[in-house]
Image (cartoon, coloured by chain):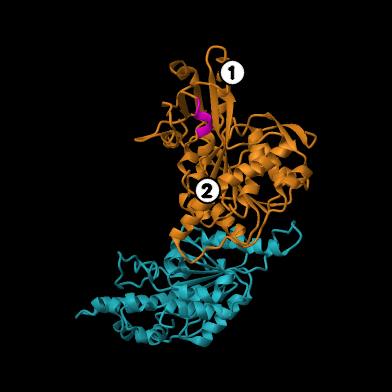
Chain colours: A orange, B cyan
């Protein structure tokens, strides 16, 4: 499209580009940022007078989210950037910010919580906070990260939604690797974002926890409809719609592999490689909370086998993605058998399908 | 409404706070501020646990100023003229709020921090805190008491004062001073709890007055590192009478009276420490 320009960017730089166009009042991050991080890129923009928001760094996640609460309560636009280690350090505040219905947008780099775990496609940190009330968008490329940032900013501030959103990208593949990203021109991004509604609507009512929780659940339901709406609107500018789920491979595929985040790239290349021998498809879940039941049900209606690829084995239960898919397929007329492959390489398990 | 010491203290402070100033109440106060809600809802921000109150106030103070200003590129080093008032209890203040770091972290923010000290962790919980006097009965294991002016370095505040609603003029002056200054201001106010202290609710005023006059609750203020004692107590006397009014000290009145003798001695030492800290001359 003529409203776009192509640049070679890392996932971090793609976030910084999106933030430059979003123009938040505050961009908050935690200390310990590496060179090439989002904050470093934004500091460069700020030095060149390309970014006007206030850049602040904090020593702890509790401080960061508390400050974000204070800054977002009067209705200012606040975006954040953290890593998986900080994300898991204050679960109570994540719940609180969701209950307060603060329209925060937080970019999260997903990685292993312990050094011996695999760094690639490890989503344990973000998955562990999936029930905090925050919307979760998992991105698999710098392009998706860029678009998700614009979309999330619009969605979070939507009057009918007003919920905090996490945009989750995997460490290294999603943050450090250079990719071609087609960026919207500034005036196009501005046209899409429009005037972000401010106002002081995010205030606690005196009715209590049960009321807030219900209002949060209702907003979460509405957010799925609004996500589709705003994704379509963004699609008119970018040319492709960042749908809640993505599908690659043969539309008539009998076997579908379901995954999230950077693992989808590997799955896609494998499907392309095996396309001659097997009819395979890859279903990539981008919007994980709220879970897009309708889209997935439609895509799975024709297949006869489903494989779920997750990074880590669940301890004493089912893996998070498998659990949701199990509930989803239970309502289907012809239920395809589900099989979970946790921590394995698709190269190995695809033969078993 | 007046029977509740917390409400009484909060209302007295709010009488002098500007109309548009946002108020932040700590979680433990949630139950007690219900009657105030109808009065102040439009300007009120109430919060839940787990929040770092000082960071929240800093964000609020800066955001309000940015919202008012049309220009985005505000100088962060410039002092924010937007004030935020936090009300919290002793437990939260000493246990979870790094007030001493506030000026280092947010030198441009304005905050009036009001600690409502019922000498318990929280008036709704009844557990002990650092401000619980030695020997007082609480619902949890007592800890060694430590006054706030020893917990926080006093020069971390632009203004700090200890007051009590029973001495109304002194109280009003201190609140007025704190409201009109900029930076970090701290008010440490006594809020006796009839339930946990063990005295009839009608005696609230008298007990509070006795606490001050017995030297149990010194009235003093610190401004830019210079301290001043507002009500001189020449000799610690009347402590026994003050203790006798309260059920929480009833078990101390043993035949030998050893514990009480120690308590009197400890209070005298505490006054000496306070004078040293404030560099105030002996009376």
Farthest residue to the front: give it. A333
Query: Residue A136: which quarter of the image?
Result: top right
Q: Chain of mark 2?
A: A
What residue is shown at x 35% (from left), y 83% (from top)? B201
Foreground residue among B219 and A326: A326
How many other residues sit within 10 Å of disc 1, few (<14), some (14-19) or many (≥20)? some
Front label number (1 vs 2): 2
What residue is shown at x 50% (from left), y 56% (from top)? A215
Whether residue B43 is visible here, answered yes or no, is yes
Residue topped by disc 2? A221
Question: Which element is circle 2 on?
Answer: helix
Q: Quarter of the image for the N terminus of chain B: give it.
A: bottom left
Foreground residue among A249 and A19: A249
Q: Residue B28 placed where, x, y %?
A: 43, 66
Q: Is residue A239 left or right of residue A165?
A: right
Membership of B244 in magenta stretch: no
Q: Residue A238 placed where, x, y %?
A: 72, 36
Q: Is residue B237 left or right of residue B102?
A: left
Q: Is A88 above or below relative to A329?
A: below
Query: Residue B134: which quarter of the image?
Result: bottom left
Earlier residue among tags 1 and 2: 2
Membership of A298 in magenta stretch: yes
Whether residue A60 is visible here, answered yes or no, is no
Magenta-highlighted residues: A297-302
Q: Residue A332 placed where, x, y %?
A: 44, 33
Query: Residue A74: which quarter of the image?
Result: bottom right
Q: Which mark is residue B283?
A: none
Residue topped by disc 1? A272
Farthest residue to the left: give it. B255
Q: Between marks 1 and 2, how big is the CA–CA gap? A: 35 Å
């Amino acid at each position: 499209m003529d409203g776009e320009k192509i640049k070679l960017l890392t996932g971090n730089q793609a976030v910084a580009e999106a933030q430059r166009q979003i123009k938040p009042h505050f961009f908050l991050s935690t200390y310990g940022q590496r060179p090439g991080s989002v904050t470093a890129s934004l500091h460069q923009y700020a030095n060149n007078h390309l970014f006007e928001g206030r850049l602040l760094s904090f020593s702890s996640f509790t401080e960061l989210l508390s400050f974000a609460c204070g800054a977002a309560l009067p209705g200012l636009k606040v975006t954040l950037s953290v890593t998986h280690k900080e994300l898991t350090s204050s679960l109570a505040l994540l719940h609180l910010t969701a209950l307060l219905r603060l329209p925060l947008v937080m970019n999260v780099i997903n990685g292993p919580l312990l050094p011996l775990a695999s760094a690639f496609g490890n989503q344990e940190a973000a998955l562990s906070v999936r029930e905090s009330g925050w919307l979760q968008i998992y991105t698999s490329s710098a392009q998706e990260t860029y678009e998700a940032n614009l979309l999330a900013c619009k969605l979070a501030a939507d009057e009918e939604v007003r919920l905090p959103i996490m945009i989750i990208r995997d460490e290294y593949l999603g943050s450090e690797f250079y990719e071609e990203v087609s960026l919207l021109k500034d005036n196009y991004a501005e046209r899409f974002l429009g005037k972000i509604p401010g106002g002081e609507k995010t205030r606690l009512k005196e009715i209590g926890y049960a009321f807030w929780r219900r209002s949060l659940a209702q907003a979460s339901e509405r957010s799925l409809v609004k996500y589709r709406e705003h994704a379509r609107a963004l699609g008119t500018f970018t040319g492709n719609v960042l749908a809640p789920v993505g599908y690659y491979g043969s539309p008539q595929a009998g076997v579908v592999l379901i995954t999230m985040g950077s693992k989808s790239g590997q799955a896609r290349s494998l499907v392309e490689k095996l396309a001659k021998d097997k009819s395979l498809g890859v279903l990539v879940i981008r919007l994980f909370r709220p879970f897009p039941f309708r889209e997935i049900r439609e895509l799975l209606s024709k297949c006869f086998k489903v494989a779920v690829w997750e990074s880590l084995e669940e301890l004493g239960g089912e893996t998070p993605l498998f659990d949701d898919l199990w509930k989803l397929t239970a309502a289907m007329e012809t239920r395809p058998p589900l099989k979970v492959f946790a921590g394995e390489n698709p190269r190995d398990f695809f033969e078993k399908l | 409404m007046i029977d509740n010491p917390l409400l009484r203290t909060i209302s007295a402070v709010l009488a002098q706070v500007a109309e548009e100033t946002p108020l932040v109440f700590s979680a433990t106060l949630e139950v007690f501020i219900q009657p105030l809600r109808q009065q102040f809802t439009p300007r009120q921000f109430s919060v839940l646990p787990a929040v770092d109150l000082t960071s929240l106030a800093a964000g609020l103070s800066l955001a309000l100023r940015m919202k008012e200003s049309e220009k985005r590129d505000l100088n962060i080093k410039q002092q924010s003229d937007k004030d935020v008032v936090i009300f919290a209890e002793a437990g939260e203040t000493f246990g979870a709020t790094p007030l001493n770091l506030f000026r280092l972290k947010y030198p441009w923010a304005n905050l009036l921090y009001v600690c409502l000290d019922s000498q318990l962790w929280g008036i709704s919980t009844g557990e002990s805190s650092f401000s619980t006097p030695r020997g007082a009965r609480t619902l949890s294991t007592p800890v060694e008491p430590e006054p706030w002016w020893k917990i926080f370095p006093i020069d971390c505040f632009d203004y700090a004062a200890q007051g009590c609603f029973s001495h109304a003029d002194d109280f009003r002056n201190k609140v007025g001073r704190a409201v009109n200054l900029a930076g970090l201001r701290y008010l440490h106010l006594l809020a006796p709890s009839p339930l946990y202290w063990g005295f009839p609710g009608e005696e609230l005023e008298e007990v509070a007055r006795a606490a001050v006059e017995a030297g149990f609750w010194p009235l003093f203020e610190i401004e830019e590192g210079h301290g001043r004692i507002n009500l001189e107590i020449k000799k610690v006397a009347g402590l026994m009478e003050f203790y006798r009014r309260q059920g929480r000290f009833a078990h101390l009145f043993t035949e030998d009276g050893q514990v009480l003798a120690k308590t009197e001695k400890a209070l005298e030492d505490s006054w000496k420490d306070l004078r040293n800290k404030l560099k105030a001359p002996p009376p």
